[in-house]
Amino acid sequence: MPHNGKLYIETVGCQMNVLDSELVVAALRQQGYALTDDMKEADTVLFNTCSVREHAEQKIYSQLGRLRVARKKKPDQVIGVIGCMAQKDQELIFQKAPHVDLIVGTGQLAEIPRLIDEARRDRKPAIAVSLDRKEGSRLDVASSFESYDPLRDPEMRPSPWQAYVRIMFGCDKFCTYCVVPMTRGPEQSRAPSEIIREVQALVAQGVREVTLLGQTVNSYKFTENGRQSRMSDLLAAIHDTPGLQRIKFVTNFPKDMTDDLLQAIRDLPKVSRYLHVPLQHGCDEVLKRMKRGYTVTDYRDMMARIRETVPGAAVSSDFIVGFCGETEEAFQKCMDVVREFRFKNSFIFKYSPRPGTKANELWSDDIPEEVKRRRNNELLTLQNEISEEDNAEFLGRTVEVLVEGPSKRTTKAKGTTSGQMAEDANLNYPMPGVVESAVLAGHVHRDHDHDHDDAGCDTGCGTGALVSLDLGRSGSTVAAAAPRTEPVQLVGRTPCDRIVVFDGQPRLAGSIAEIHVHDCTPTTLLGSIVTRQIQHGNETLLPILM
Ligand code: SAM
Ligand code: SF4
C-alpha cells in the first residue's frame, strides 16, 4: 500500500552505513515515503548506527532520549534503531529506550519496510537480527546475514556521478579490539557478475566514479563457473565499463596486498593510485595483541612493493592510540612509523573497549583518557606536518580533478541543507562522495577524534569567466550551453584522492577539470582551473579567465 509518510534518517559511522542508508531510503521512497530534515515532523525516524567506538553509541542513546519526550506529542511516530548497534545490543536497546519500536540488524535491512508497517499497525515492538557468531555454524551465521538487494535509485544520490558498490560483506579477521566481525557477520564476497551488472547500471544512471567497499576489500575472492576471481580480476572487469572514469576501493588489509593487485593498479588507468591500508600501530608487540597478523617489517616490505610497482601512489593509514598496555615506548614507535612511511594522511582513534571483543575480555582499558588524548594529538600533529609537506610538493603543478560540487564553505555560506549536512559530517575518512550521501541520508555523523575538512582554508582561489575546459581521459563534455551562474568555491579530488578546492561554475560538477595548484594546507590543495591553449603546435596551460 503506498504511503505518504515522512521519513527522517540519521546515519552514524562508516561508508558501509552510508550505503546501507541509501538502500533503505531507496526502498522506502519506492513505497511513497518522502525524506524530511525535521525529526519532530517525521512519521518514521530511523537511526542507522555504528558500534566501532562507544562514543558513536552514546550519541544515538542521547538522540533517543530526546525523542522520548517528543514522542508524547506524536504518539504515532515509529522509531527504529538499525545497523551495527541493533545487531550488537539487540533487546538491550528496548530496555534502555522503551519507546523504540524497531530494532533491525545489518543483515536484515530488507525487512525494514514490512516491519515499519507492522509497528504502525500493531504498536508492538519488533526485532530482526542475524545469528550471533557463536549461535551456529559459519554457514548458518553467514546465511542469517542476508545480502541486501542492491536497489539503486539515482534519485537517491544527490551526487549522480559517484556511488559506493559493496563487493564484500562482513569480516573474519577478528582483530582483538574490533566489533565488526560480530556486527556485520562472516566475510562473504559478492559474485563478480552481480557487481559488474550493478556498476553498469550505475554508469547508465550517470555515475562516473565507483568506490568498491569491503572491510578488507583486497581479500576479495569469488569462484564462479569454476573460475576464481581475485580483486585484480574484478578491477580489470569493472575497468572495461564504458563511461566509467574512476575506480576506488577501501579498506585494504596489509597482509592481502598482493603483487597482482598492485600490477592491476599500475596497469589500469581508471583505478585510483590511492591505497588506504591501515597499519594500526608501530610496535610489533601491540600489533600482536591486536591480532593483526603482521609486523612492522612486513608492512615495510609491503610499502616497498607499493612504491616499486605503483610509483607516486598515495597511501593512508588508521592508528589506534591508548590500546591496552600501550607503553610510552610503544607509542613512540607509532610516531616513528608515521615519520618513516610518510602517509598521505592518517585517521587516529583513541582506543575504545568494545563488549564482545577479545581485548575487552583479556585486558583492562588501562591507559588514562588524558594520556590517550595527548598521544592522539601528538600523532595527529606529526601527521599533519607530513601531510602539509607532502601537499607542498604539488605547488606549481597541474592536477586532474573530478569535480564533486560546491565546497563545504560554499554550501555553508549559502545556508543550504547540504551545507548543514556537510557540516555534520567529518568528510575526509576514505569515503569520497559522503557529502552527497549525507544529503541523501538525512544526516551523517562521523565518530572521529579529529576533524578534516574539504575546504578548511579561507583562501579564495581562481577568478574570472569560464572559457573552456580540458575534460580529461573520458572526453565527455561539460554542458557548454548550461546557463551561466556566479562562480563558487568547488571541491574535487585527484586520482590520488587529494582534496582540491578552486573557484568555478557549479555546472562543472561531475566533470574532470585541470587545476593549477598554488597553495595548500595539510588536508587541501588550493588552485585555479586551467585551460589548454594550443599555439603553433605548442601546448600551454593558462589559468581560466572568468
Ligand atoms: N577493516 C578496516 C581495517 O581493518 O583496517 C577497518 C574498519 S574499522 C570500522 C575503522 C577503524 O576504526 C579501524 O581501522 C580502527 O583504526 C578503528 N577502530 C576499530 N575498533 C576500534 C576500537 N575499539 N577503538 C578505537 N578505534 C577502533
Ligand atoms: Fe575490524 Fe580487523 Fe575486520 Fe578491520 S580487519 S573490520 S579492524 S576485525
Image: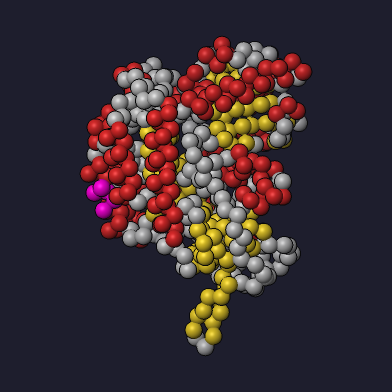
At x 28%, y 34%, the residue is 330
Q: Is residue 64 visible?
A: yes
Q: Is residue 159 above or below residue 446?
A: below
Tell whether position 303 is magenta.
Answer: yes
Magenta span: predominant SS is helix
Q: Position of residue 176 (x, y in %)?
A: 33, 27
| Residue at 69%, 50% in the rendered image | 413
User: As displayed, is residue 82 above or below residue 312?
Assistant: above
Q: Residue at x 60, y 15 (%)?
A: 97
Q: Nearer the viewer, residue 327 or 480?
A: 327
- Residue numbers of the magenta segment: 300-304
Quarter holding the N terminus? top right
- Image quadrant assignment for residue 438: top right
Relative to 8, is 515 above or below? below
The quadrant of the rendering that contains the C terminus is bottom right
Furthest-bottom residue in view?
536
In the foreground, 361 or 369? 369
Q: Is residue 174 visible?
A: no
Residue 480: percent from left, percent from top: 67, 68
Give percent across and percent down for residue 278: 36, 41
Residue 177 horizontal/vertical position (percent): 36, 27
Q: How is the image coloured?
A: secondary structure
- Say left or right for 258 vs 508: left
- The residue under the point 67% across, 21% down is 67
